[in-house]
Image (cartoon, rainbow, N blue to C red):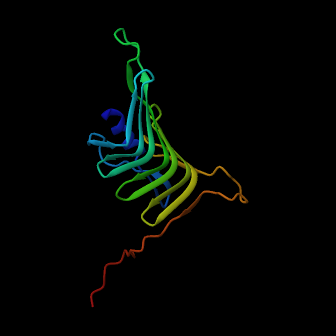
Amino acid sequence: MKRWTAAAMTALILFGVGAGGAAFAQQGGSSAPVDVSADNQETINSKCLIIFTGRVEILQNRSRLRAEKVTIYNAKRPTAENANACGSAERMEAEGTVYLVSDQQNARGDRAVYTFSNNTAVLTGDVIVVKGKDVARGDRLTVNTKTNDAKLESTSPGRSAQRRVRAVFYQDDTPKSDAPAQQR
C-alpha cells in the first residue's frame, strides 16, 4: 500500500499559483512515511480496489489530502498461482470536498483524480487554489506532474458566462533597489 500512497501524495498533493499562473508544487520526497486514516477501509482483491471512506486523511511530510472517499485502482495481473493478483496502482480518485494542503499552498475541489501512467492530476468542481495571498478559481485544474504544466479551465467559456476562470495575484510588497543603500 505504501507504493500507491507515496506516489499519489507527491503527484496530487498540491497545486500552487504564482504570477505566471497555475503551477504544480511537489512537496518533499516520496520515500517519507505515509499515514492514512479513515472511518473504513475495504480491499476488494477480485477487482484490485482499495477504498477508504469517511473522513479520509492522508499525510506525508507536511502535506495532507482530505476527502470523504479515496479509491485506489490497481492493475490486474493474472499469474499462474493467482488469477486475481493485483499489480501497481493505475489511478487514485478522491471524492467529496477534496482538500490538498501543504506549508505554502492549498487547493480545494469536489473531486481529484491522479492517473499514474501519464502523471496527470485533475481537480474538478468548484476549484479554489491559494498560495499566500494569491487566489485562483475555476472548474477544472489539470496538472502534468512530470512537466509541471498546468491548465485551469471554466466549463462556461465566454465573456458573458457567469463562471469564468478568475485569479488575483498580489505583487511583492518588498521594495527592490539596484542602488546601494545610502548612509546618513
Which residue appears at 26% of the width and 42% of the height?
33
Q: Is residue 173 left or right of residue 155?
A: left
- What residue appears at the point 42 percent right and 25 percent down from the top-left corner? 48
Q: Whole-percent x and y of residue 100?
A: 42, 51
- Residue that sits furthest to the right in the current view: 160
The residue depicted at 27 percent of the width and 87 percent of the height is 183
Q: Measured along the vertical axis of the image, is residue 110 above or below residue 45?
A: below
Query: Could you tell me which quadrant the C terminus lies in?
Result: bottom left
Answer with the quarter of the image where residue 4 lies: top left
Coordinates of residue 92 in the picture (x, y in percent):
44, 36
Between 55 and 110, which is closer to the camera in this rendering?
55
| Residue at image location 37% in from the left, 59% down from the top | 104
Q: Position of residue 34 (x, y in %)?
A: 29, 42
Q: Is 43 situated above or below 104?
A: above
**How many dots with numbers?**
0
- In front here: 170 or 67? 67
Asked whether, in this view, residue 2 is left or right of residue 16, the answer is left
Looking at the image, residue 1 sits to the left or right of residue 149; the answer is left
Q: Nearer the viewer, residue 2 or 182?
A: 2
- Measured from the top left, where is residue 24 in percent x and y? 44, 49
Quarter of the image for the N terminus: give it. top left
View extreme (bottom): residue: 184
Q: Which residue extends farthest top?
A: 80
